[in-house]
């Protein structure tokens, strides 16, 4: 009789656990559960009718182009459309930069780590930060260090201390616009300082920017890439939040000298991003008013953001020690508890009241479970669910604090 033997998991995957956010989805399907836990775009923003018509047309007129292998760098027309829009509208990308279309922003993060870090190197992230980014970093067997966040983004004084003391920092991972999970924006002063530190210490910045265009108020800030004159910034953009996440189309704008190795790394991973979604987006950008579509997305999310901020303000009245962010864009609000109270225990208490959130521990670079925050999402629930959910949240927080 043969013995059953389970292969040993590689050292690089040992520190990587399933996404805590994905795990919360198990609870959101329970009857009566209101979910503030997701991070998905709202289906009301999907250009479904236009894509149905474009899909049929593409399959009729160019089935071989849709179904055959494609170019690893990405579908040429979409590369040019993306490159020109980023440059003309947001001043992102210099003459010697190149663009690589990738399978969602997540692949852009992965390729950057694959190409720019070695085992034993150090990668710096914000604390808290996006769980998908953190897990990608962990999978490359590098040292992951978190830098504290506040209302103005990453603490650049703390970052400089890390850069002075750690000799093998290769990459700084940041989400400067409407950060996931906190919803805050990095201030202009800190953006400039971050660029200066990267240049001084010879470190690359990976600017993860899926929410850049989802601003509902306040003054727009320049991207880190638009402030970069020395090639120290890689810009990771995505069509997931402005078109549809299921298409899995993102892009990297990076120094042209890096592009060949990034392309080779992509060939090893998936050969090329699917032709059909790339061609669909290219046709959509060419034949429809994409700026008007983005404005529609903003209108949808602005109403939901306002509803959640108003609901939290009303239901947390008198709980002055409980603080929450009031984001000018993006999809998330961060609630911080005072006195070292556990966000994970609040998460469990809320589940008992049929409200799902994400505990702050999911976003901690060190994986600490005693984080004091929780993340709320306003893009997916309806206004009615937000009204009900914020009432549950306020009542549960009061009991929890007592």
Image (cartoon, rainbow, N blue to C red):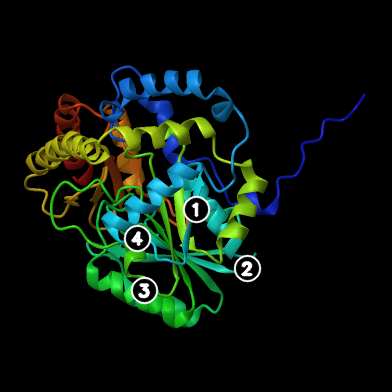
Residue 189 vertical position relative to residue 140 in the rendered view, above or below: below
Q: Are marks 4 and 1 in contact (CB under 8 Å)?
A: no
Which callout, 2 or 4, points to the residue nearer the camera? 4
Question: Can you tell which quarter of the image residue 224 is in?
Answer: bottom left
Which callout, 1 or 2, points to the residue nearer the camera? 1
Dot 1: element: helix
Mark 3 to mark 1 CA distance (whole Å): 19 Å
Mark 2 to mark 4 CA distance (whole Å): 32 Å
- Mark 4 highlights which residue? 92
For the residue pair 94 and 366, the one nearer the viewer reads as 94
Mark 4 to mark 1 CA distance (whole Å): 18 Å
Q: Are marks 2 and 3 in contact (CB under 8 Å)?
A: no
Which callout, 4 or 1, points to the residue nearer the camera? 4
- Mark 1 highlights which residue? 109
* Percent of width and height locating residue 171: 49, 67
Dot 2: element: loop
Residue 51 vertical position relative to residue 313 in the rendered view, above or below: above
Q: Residue at x 12, y 40 (%)?
A: 306
* Percent of width and height locating residue 236: 42, 54
For the residue pair 104 and 257, the one nearer the viewer reads as 257
In this rendering, position of residue 306 left or right of residue 277: left
- Mark 3 highlights which residue? 195
Mark 1 to mark 2 CA distance (whole Å): 18 Å
In this rendering, position of residue 67 left or right of residue 217: right
Q: Earlier in the sequence, mark 4 or mark 3?
A: 4
- Mark 3 crowd level (few <14, some 14–19, many ≥20, 10 Å Cα): many
């Amino acid at each position: 009789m043969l013995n059953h033997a389970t292969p040993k998991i590689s050292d690089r995957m040992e520190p990587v656990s399933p996404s805590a956010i994905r795990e919360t989805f198990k609870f959101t399907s329970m009857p009566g559960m209101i979910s503030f836990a997701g991070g998905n775009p709202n289906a009301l923003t999907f250009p479904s009718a236009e894509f149905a018509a474009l899909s049929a047309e593409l399959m009729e007129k160019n089935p071989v182009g849709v179904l055959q292998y494609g170019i690893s760098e990405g579908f040429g027309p979409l590369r040019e459309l993306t490159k020109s829009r980023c440059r003309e509208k947001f001043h992102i990308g210099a003459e010697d930069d190149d663009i690589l279309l990738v399978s969602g922003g997540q692949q852009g993060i992965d390729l950057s780590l694959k190409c720019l870090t070695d085992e034993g190197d150090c990668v710096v992230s914000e604390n808290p930060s996006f769980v998908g980014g953190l897990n990608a970093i962990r999978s490359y067997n590098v040292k992951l260090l978190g830098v504290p966040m506040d209302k103005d983004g990453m603490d650049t004084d703390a970052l400089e201390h890390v850069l002075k003391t750690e000799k093998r920092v290769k990459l700084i991972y940041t989400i400067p616009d409407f950060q996931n999970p906190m919803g805050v924006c990095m201030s202009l002063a800190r953006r400039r300082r971050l660029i200066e530190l990267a240049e001084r210490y010879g470190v690359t910045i990976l600017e993860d920017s899926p929410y850049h265009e989802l601003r509902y108020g306040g003054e727009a800030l320049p991207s880190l890439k638009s402030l970069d004159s020395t090639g120290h910034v890689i810009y990771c953009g995505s069509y997931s939040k402005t078109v549809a996440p299921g298409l899995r189309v993102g892009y990297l704008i990076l120094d042209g000298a890096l592009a060949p190795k990034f392309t080779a790394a992509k060939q090893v991973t998936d050969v090329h991003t699917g032709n059909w979604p790339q061609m669909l987006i290219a046709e959509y950008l060419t034949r429809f008013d994409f700026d008007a579509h983005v404005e529609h997305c903003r209108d949808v999310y602005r109403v939901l953001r306002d509803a959640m901020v108003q609901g939290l303000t009303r239901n947390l009245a008198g709980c002055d020690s409980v603080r929450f962010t009031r984001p000018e864009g993006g999809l998330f609000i961060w609630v911080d508890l005072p006195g070292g109270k556990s966000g994970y225990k609040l998460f469990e208490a809320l589940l008992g009241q049929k409200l799902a959130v994400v505990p702050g521990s999911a976003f901690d670079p060190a994986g600490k479970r005693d984080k004091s925050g929780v993340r709320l999402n306003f893009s997916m629930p309806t206004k009615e669910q937000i009204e009900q959910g914020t009432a549950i949240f306020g009542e549960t927080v009061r009991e929890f604090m007592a």
